[in-house]
Amino acid sequence: MTNSVQEHIVMNSSDNRLMSDVMKANLSRRSILKLGGAVGAIALLPAAFNSRHVFAQPSQPIHIRKMTSLGFTPIPFSSEDRVTVPNGYSANVFYAWGDPVGLEHNQPEFKSDASNTAEEQAAQAGMNHDGMAYFPFAQHGNEHGLLVMNHEYIDNGLLFPDGDKTWSLEKVKKSQNAMGISVIEIKKVNQQWQVVRPSKYARRITPHTPMQLTGPAKNHDLMKTAADPLGELILGTMQNCANGETPWGTYLTCEENWSDIFVRESNNFTQLDKRYGIMQKEKEDKYRWNEFDERFNTDKHPNEPHRFGWVVEIDPFDPNATPVKHTALGRFKHEGAMLVLSKEGHAVVYMGDDQRFEYIYKFVSKGKYNPNDRVANRRLLSEGKLYVAHFNEDNTGEWRPLVHNQNGLTAENGFANQGDVVIKARLAADLVGGTKMDRPEWIAVDPYQTGSVYCTLTNNSQRGTEGKAGINAANPRAKNNYGHIIRWQENAQDYLSETFTWDIFALGGNKLKGEHYVNGDDFGSPDGLRFDNHGILWVQTDVSSGTLNKKAYEGMGNNQMLAVIPEQGEFKRFLTAPNGSEVTGIAFTPDNKTMFINIQHPGEPDSGVTEPDQVTAISTWPDSQGKTRPRSATIVIQKEDGGVIGS
């Protein structure tokens, strides 16, 4: 997640217990859970993806084994304007903002002065790469597949030669076309990865792309607009942050800071406006879409915001397939959607709502996965049960159902039906007593410990100032500047369980400030999180640009990525990022010999957007000559001896 204009604003005014209160009560007796379970959860692994289509297991079998040690020498902190990886590894840029996506007969090249048109931008990589997934082809999947990634947000100072001066409809369209999703075909040729151009799979999905609705909010009165009186067909997705993927070969993209774009020019804010962050932004608004696209003026179109804040399913193998917004998974500021199959075959999706004092959610599908019926699988996320997590003081927890007519979710309390519940998911979670968390980000499930789930909680400098938390609960700190990683184990090693046990897996810190809490290398503001299929947990950080190497983070350099084997608990720094950037997005080939990482917003200033005359002031990455504007990009990491990443 990048910084939102609402980064310092708290939308949750409920009286629910803060996670800090719960952790404080447990700190003196906290211990690592003995996470049981045999090697399993194979449905999580990329090698297990299969269908009767082009998406399948690699042609050669993969012998998956648990990694017992990390074989690389950790690297130091860095403040250099480049990507650094350990000796024996290479990191190469291969898909940057403005690169052609690979459409047939439409492959505009990037113009370094940012003069590409809106039409050209629609055929190019968007800005600020984020969540990402790799989908191998049935044949040669370790060297040929589709890479799908989010483009979270835009910076007008970089996107246009003169920034947001002389604002126009053309600028709004280009800004919109720089968000969304890229689907690119990639192939390894002579040991080097490249984008296949042209490709029949190449596609850009933007805030203009038609999308279908499924689930309880479909046809709901709050979803209806003048352009869509039935409330079932939506234009576009935006502010796509982290992601997920399914065993049937589809991509899940998550709408996060969508409220930043909507503007209510009057002061007539509704309850939902306030709970989700619709504000009168005026000059604070950094997008200005409402000036030429009235969809984003909520005075004129009050229901339009309800049509964003969802998890969207995309079929990367069919460029003509209409993306689907699954409303059964709830509406909030989705960071990611981690999907795993239960023992019985139900799809279980873990999700975080990335804002201070928001919640962790779980969705369980009504139907079951059928490896021989991809069409039926595409309906799994349309119907099921949504839950919010409640963490108890004794290291136990429960999933509280967000179901109409249960736990006070009744018409008398503003929930006339399940459509109301999912559209107003934050209010529903408030009412049933979800536990307030410190910005829930990515969620990862351990493939070697069935039922073991991890979630990054980036930070919350307002803990202790809200009037409810008292002292910081993760430890005696007054503020949670560094964040932490929480872990829970579903009871009976069953993802369907409505109860769990939990512990704190790691606390961020900075030994240079006398706050060292981890075994191994220090880090703060954990964000991206993913297990590879050898059981290594990869952790990416998102320290805000105004805090990098300053204040509590003094001496810690740029953002980074670390690796840890949970049973050992020793963190090793594997990658450091260019100046002003965030490390995000992570994907692997099935053999774990190639890792894809995204570098987002290199050169981002301490606050606000980039000034047009300062585009190279902080970073010029990935331009090694140090002359052109910085560009978010995907990098490919390989071991020089051809071995498994991390070994």
Image (tube, grey):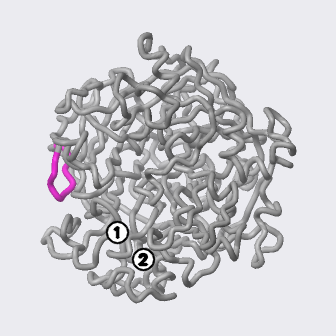
Circle 1 is placed at which residue position?
A: 609
Q: Tell me: 322 left or right of 195.
A: right
Q: Nearer the viewer, mark 1 or mark 2?
A: 1
Tags 1 and 2 touching, CB below 8 Å: no
Real-space Cα separation, disc 1 to disc 2, in angstroms: 22 Å
- Which quadrant holds residue 537? top left
Q: Earlier in the sequence, mark 1 or mark 2?
A: 2
Is residue 25 depicted above or below 451 in this figure?
A: above
Q: Which residue is mark 2?
A: 124
Task: Note whether residue 340 is visible.
Answer: yes
Which image quadrant: the C terminus? top left
> Can you tell which mark lies on residue 203?
none
Query: Where 641 sits versus 179, above or below?
Result: above
Q: Which residues lie in the magenta part?
A: 78-86
Query: Alpha-carbon neighbours of circle 2 within 10 Å: few (<14), some, or many (≥20)?
Result: many
Location of residue 356 in the rendering, given as x and y in whole percent from the top left corner: 49, 43
Q: Is residue 613 left or right of residue 206?
A: left
Q: Amino acid at mark 1?
A: Val
Residue depicted at x 69% and y 29%: 496
Rendering quarter of residue 614: bottom left
Report which quarter residue 320 is drawn in: bottom right
Q: Position of residue 312 (x, y in %)?
A: 62, 58
Report helix, strand or loop for mark 1: loop
Asked if the stretch drawn in magenta spans residue 635, the answer is no
Q: Residue at x 55, y 62 (%)?
A: 258
State whether residue 640 appears in this view.
no
